[in-house]
Structures are given as structure tokens and as C-alpha cells.
């Protein structure tokens, strides 16, 4: 009897994850990109608002800040991650060279799979062996050249995003949302994801 409950709960979890992903996907548009002064918590005089950043007093406040800000600034955080990836990629030209070289090798392999190779290569480099060789080369390039920059992108982005989400005051965000709601004539367009 415990197995159906486990299956049901895994289906519920899967449905919940798919629901959240569809909401996130619908929110990742440029129309949900928040203006920089609002994202940074600046006042109209371009000074930092005294209520924009507050150290969370409890774990519950921290969780509320993170959930509210992750939902409200999702597109901004994605832009930060994308810009971070571009900057770190440009600072690793050898990685870029090897990634382009591997992509070109895969492209050439895809073109030549259906065509015969020259006779001196044909018995040795079958399509299966070429695919296996390219997989090994791709794995080597990923581990040797791409892994550290990828970890740097993930680490720096996580640090910046979680730091901003934890420190940005959720009450300040809710005040902005209610002000936007009042100025739009009562429309409830808060642009947030219910998690």
C-alpha cells in the first residue's frame, strides 16, 4: 500500500515542478525586466533608499526576502547570469577556441556520416568510431577547458543573486507592487510567481 502513495507523491512533485517551470518560462520576457533603479533600490534622486536593503532578522524573514525577490526580479537575475557567462567566456579565449573547434568537428561529422570517406580512412574510421572519438574529445575539452569557467559562472552568479535576494527588503518590493497596482487602476499585475 505504501507504493501507490509514493507513486502518487512523485507524480504530484513532478506536476508541481512542471507547473513552476511553466510559470517561470512565461515570466522570462523583457516586459518583466525591472528597471535598474528599482532593482538596485534607488530613490528618484538616485540615492540608495534606506529601506531597500535590510539584514534579515530571522530565518523566516530571510526566506520571505529570497522567495519574493527571486520571483519579482527573475528576469533581472537571468540577465546577470547571462552577462556573467559572457564576461567569463570572453576572459577564457582558449576555452572559446576549443569549444568552436569541437563544434566544427561535430558539424563535419554530421555532414560526413552519410557520405563515404576516402578509401584509406574508411575501414578505420567508421561512423561509430568517429562518434566515440568525438565524444571522448568533447568530454576532454569540457573537463580540461570548460569546467572551471562554468563553475566560476555558477559561483559568481549564485553569490550575486542570492546576496541581492537575501538583502533586498521584501516589504519595499511589496510597497512598489501595491503602488504599481494603484497607478494601473486596480489591475493585479504584480509579475510574480506563486511558489
Image (cartoon, grey):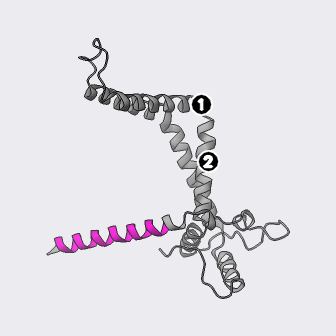
Q: Which residues are magenta?
A: 3-24
Q: Secondary structure at mark 1?
A: helix
Q: Secondary structure at mark 2?
A: helix
**Looking at the figure, which quarter contains the N terminus?**
bottom left
Residue at the location (49% across, 36% down)? 146
In percent of width and height, residue 162 lies at: 58, 60
Residue 103's place in the image compared with 125, above or below, is below
Callout 1 crowding tier (Cα within 10 Å): few <14, some 14–19, many ≥20: few
Residue 53 part of the magenta segment: no
Q: Using the image as rendered, state which of residue 155 and residue 91 is in the foreground.
A: 91
Callout 2 crowding tier (Cα within 10 Å): few <14, some 14–19, many ≥20: some
Q: Residue furthest top?
A: 120
Could you give the CA–CA distance between mark 1 and mark 2, rounded to whole angstroms? 15 Å
Residue 4 part of the magenta segment: yes
Picture quadrant where residue 38 is located: bottom right
Direction from residue 47 to residue 52 in the image, left or right = left
In percent of width and height, residue 186 lies at: 65, 88
Of the two numbered discs 1 and 2 on the same chain, state the one appearing first in sequence: 2
Direction from residue 139 to residue 49 in the image, left or right = right
The residue to which callout 2 is attached is 84
Q: Are marks 1 and 2 in contact (CB under 8 Å)?
A: no
Picture quadrant where residue 96 is located: top right
Residue 93 — which label?
Answer: 1
Direction from residue 180 to residue 127 in the image, left or right = left
Q: Residue furthest left?
A: 1
Residue at the location (55% across, 49% down)? 155
Q: Using the image as rendered, state which of residue 63 and residue 139 is in the foreground.
A: 139
Amino acid at each position: 500500500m505504501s507504493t501507490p502513495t509514493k507513486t502518487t507523491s512523485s507524480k504530484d512533485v513532478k506536476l508541481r515542478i512542471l507547473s513552476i517551470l511553466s510559470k517561470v518560462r512565461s515570466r522570462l520576457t523583457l516586459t518583466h525586466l525591472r528597471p535598474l533603479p528599482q532593482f538596485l533600490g534607488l530613490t528618484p534622486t538616485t540615492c540608495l533608499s534606506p529601506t531597500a536593503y535590510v539584514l534579515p532578522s530571522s530565518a523566516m524573514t530571510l526566506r520571505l526576502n529570497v522567495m519574493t525577490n527571486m520571483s519579482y526580479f527573475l528576469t533581472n537575475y537571468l540577465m546577470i547570469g547571462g552577462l556573467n557567462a559572457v564576461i567569463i567566456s570572453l576572459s577564457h579565449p582558449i576555452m572559446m577556441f576549443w569549444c568552436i573547434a569541437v563544434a566544427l568537428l561535430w558539424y563535419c561529422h554530421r555532414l560526413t556520416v552519410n557520405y563515404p570517406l576516402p578509401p584509406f580512412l574508411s575501414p578505420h574510421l567508421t561512423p561509430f568510431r568517429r562518434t566515440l572519438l568525438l565524444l571522448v574529445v568533447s568530454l576532454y575539452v569540457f573537463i580540461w577547458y570548460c569546467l572551471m569557467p562554468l563553475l566560476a559562472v555558477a559561483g559568481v552568479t549564485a553569490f550575486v543573486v542570492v546576496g541581492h535576494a537575501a538583502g533586498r527588503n521584501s516589504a519595499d518590493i511589496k510597497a512598489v507592487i501595491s503602488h504599481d497596482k494603484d497607478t494601473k487602476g486596480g489591475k493585479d499585475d504584480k509579475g510574480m510567481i506563486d511558489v
